[in-house]
Image (cartoon, helix red, strand yellow):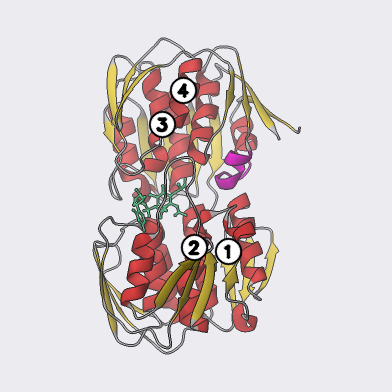
Amino acid sequence: MDKIIINGGRTLKGDVSISGSKNAALPILVSALLTDGKCTFHNVPDLRDIRSIIELLAHLGVRVERENNTVTIDASGLNNHEAPYEIVRTMRASILVLCPLVARLKKARVSLPGGCAIGARPINFHLKGLTSLGASIELEHGYVKASAKELIGNEIYFDIPTVTGTENLMMAAVLAKGETKLRNAAREPEVIALADVLTKMGAKIDGVGTSIITIKGVSALKPVTVTIIPDRIETGTFMTAAALTKGDVLIKDCEPEHVGGIILKLKLTGADIRAENNNIRARGADEIESVDIKTLPYPGFPTDMQAQFMVLMSVAKGLSMITETIFENRYIHVSELKRMGADITLSGNSAMVKGVNTLSGAPVMATDLRASASLILAGLSAKGKTEISRVYHLDRGYDAIEKKFKKLGAAIERIKD
Ligand code: EPZ
């Protein structure tokens, strides 16, 4: 397994270009299943998770071709309704094929995704929603078996505004008979991006970006050519890295509107963050102020930025309180940061972070995608050498991040193992 070695203390300077959004690309690539022609997707990031979903789509009988950051998908040959455990277990967002398969083939057999390091990650809202559209669902031998002669529009309420739950049910409702209302729907930019693609395919969707989405089913959808939106979490990660290293970084090809909350919080820490069209200039302050954060559904502070922000707070002046409200076990990075000298006390879903002068480099282990990004940030800031193992977690969601940091002046290397 590859390792990343960092010699910390460098100031990041220069410009970096943001890749396409992993969490927008995943549902959008899957949405091609809803059409029986050739869709073309530009600005698709080169990530492990994207390779996993492409492998799954090919397994379903769909023709998938990739050239650089463009992926073409022809779902006219869709002939397999089974998503096997071997593929789903590598990438739990594979559950997104469930509803499109029922919408197109009237049946699906998808392996239950199971949990991951940050939580149990149940899919009960996905299943309850699909049932209310008329599907019959059985759970057997670790698989979801779903079938429906016809999907009929209905009202669906999400107890929690689930991102992939909203995306999955949107992809069922667009081909259901009649009207569907999704209440307490997720409002993330990735949900809006998917709805934009579905609308371009001919779907009738109102209210996307609000908590109530109304969908009028149509009989068929047509193939499209679209460009994936920039990754807001990668954008937030680089803004935080600039603040952390007192650097001066121009972040290009991003969407400032999608990171408004992160920008405001970083400004409160003293960083100078300026949005200019599709670019953001982020400059770090000499002193980092402590700021409290609470993760919430969009437009709240994103849970996928909690670990990265915690690193910044670990070398800020004073005390900050971080509260994680989305996932039940998203503090695995804390023990590794404490090995680097961070002063963090956990209590339930809150972490009290007492700023220290500096972190110290150490051998650490990545455990999940965003935790591994936080360990890179910690290594960039720490005195001495940090060695991060199990970086395959990182490759799931960041496109050659060590090359991007190296271009900004970081002393960072990937060691092939
Ligand atoms: C999406 O996961 C993202 N993944 C996650 O990003 C992100 O952290 C999360 O949304 C929250 O923003 C993708 O988009 C592929 P949820 P998702 O359903 O959809 C509970 C990353 O690092 N819940 O919005 O799985 C759930 O347990 C990843 O890129 C149920 O109880 O998250 C959680 O507590 C990590 N039942 C809360 O809702 C359900 O049926 C929010 O989960 C569904 C969810």
Would residue 228 be seen by someone viewing this image from the given angle? no
Give the CA separation, mark 4 to mark 2: 31 Å
Left or right? Give the position of 235 relative to 5: left
Position in image of residue 208 (x %, y %): 30, 67
Instruction: Describe the element under mark 3 as helix, strand or loop.
Output: loop
Left or right? Give the position of 78 relative to 138: right
Position in image of residue 79 (x %, y %): 63, 81
Looking at the rendering, the stretch of residues picked out in magenta corresponds to 392-400
* Residue drawn at (59%, 61%) of the image: 53
Pick whichever, 3 or 400, lies toward us. 3
Q: Is residue 413 above or below residue 41?
A: above
Q: Is residue 395 magenta?
A: yes
Instruction: Describe the element under mark 1 as helix, strand or loop.
Output: strand
Position in image of residue 374 (x %, y %): 49, 30
Please, what is the three-letter code of the amino acid marked with disc 3? Answer: Tyr
**Callout 4–callout 3 Cβ contact below 8 Å:** no
Give the CA separation, mark 4 to mark 3: 8 Å
Give the CA separation, mark 2 to mark 3: 25 Å
Tag 2 residue: 95
Count residues near mark 2 (Cα–Cα under 10 Å), then give few for <14, some for 14-19, many for 20+: many
Q: Quadrant of the C terminus?
A: top right
Left or right? Give the position of 209 relative to 110: left
Which of the 4 image quadrants contains residue 350? top left
Give the CA separation, mark 4 to mark 1: 39 Å
Tag 1 residue: 42
Label located before the other in sequence (4 or 2):
2
Instruction: Describe the element under mark 4 as helix, strand or loop.
Output: helix
Please, what is the three-letter code of the amino acid marked with disc 4? Answer: Ser
**Callout 2–callout 1 Cβ contact below 8 Å:** no
Please, what is the three-letter code of the amino acid marked with disc 2? Answer: Ile
Tag 3 residue: 331
